[in-house]
Image (spheres, rainbow, N blue to C red):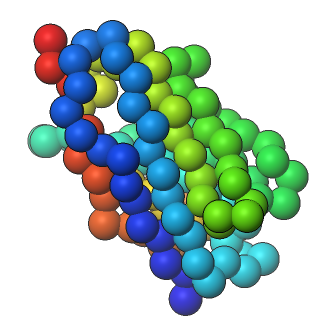
Amino acid sequence: QVQLVESGGGLVQAGESLRLSCVTSGRTSSSDATGWFRQAPGKEREFVAAISWRSGGTYVSDSRFTISRDNAKNSVILQMNSLKPEDTAVYYCAAGPVVAGQTSRYGWWGRGTQVTVSS
């Protein structure tokens, strides 16, 4: 059973940076990818970034964001720079077999962490 726990959310001002962490456990070959998604009130959950534990390959939706992994800590980091009010959302960590942008490709999800960007 894959478990994911997000942390690092909070309230920041526009233009500032935030670093989210997702600590994973129980990963297997069927959960090689860890992705970040976000969901704003009244909107669908959307892809942010994903990384492969095996290859280190990444897929990012916005150049302001970078994703990396820390093998020793079993964690995936989402670095978000130049934040905008429209980045306000609950950010979720998810695990799946391959790096992909669709929520349906991920079978395990964390509970999320709130990111609020004020103008």
Q: Is 91 left or right of 106, judged from the image as shown?
A: left
Above or below for 38 versus 62 = below
Residue at 52% across, 40% down:
78
Give the quadrant of the C terminus.
top left
Q: What is the x, y in percent for residue 105?
A: 57, 61
Q: What is the x, y in percent for residue 17?
A: 40, 23
Q: Is residue 48 visible?
A: no
**Count of numbered circles on the image:** 0
Q: Is residue 119 visible?
A: yes
Give the quadrant of the N terminus.
bottom right
Quarter where residue 9 is shown: top left
Residue at 31% across, 58% down:
112
The furthest residue to the bottom: 1
Above or below for 58 versus 4 = above
Residue at 56% across, 46% down:
77
Q: Is 5 left or right of 59, judged from the image as shown?
A: left
Above or below for 85 versus 70 = above
Quarter where residue 44 is shown: top left
Q: What is the x, y in percent for residue 85?
A: 21, 19
Camera-nearest residue between 26 and 71: 71
The furthest residue to the front: 72
Quarter where residue 6 is shown: bottom left
Q: Is 5 left or right of 98, judged from the image as shown?
A: left
Residue at 45% across, 37% down:
19
Q: What is the x, y in percent for residue 41?
A: 13, 42
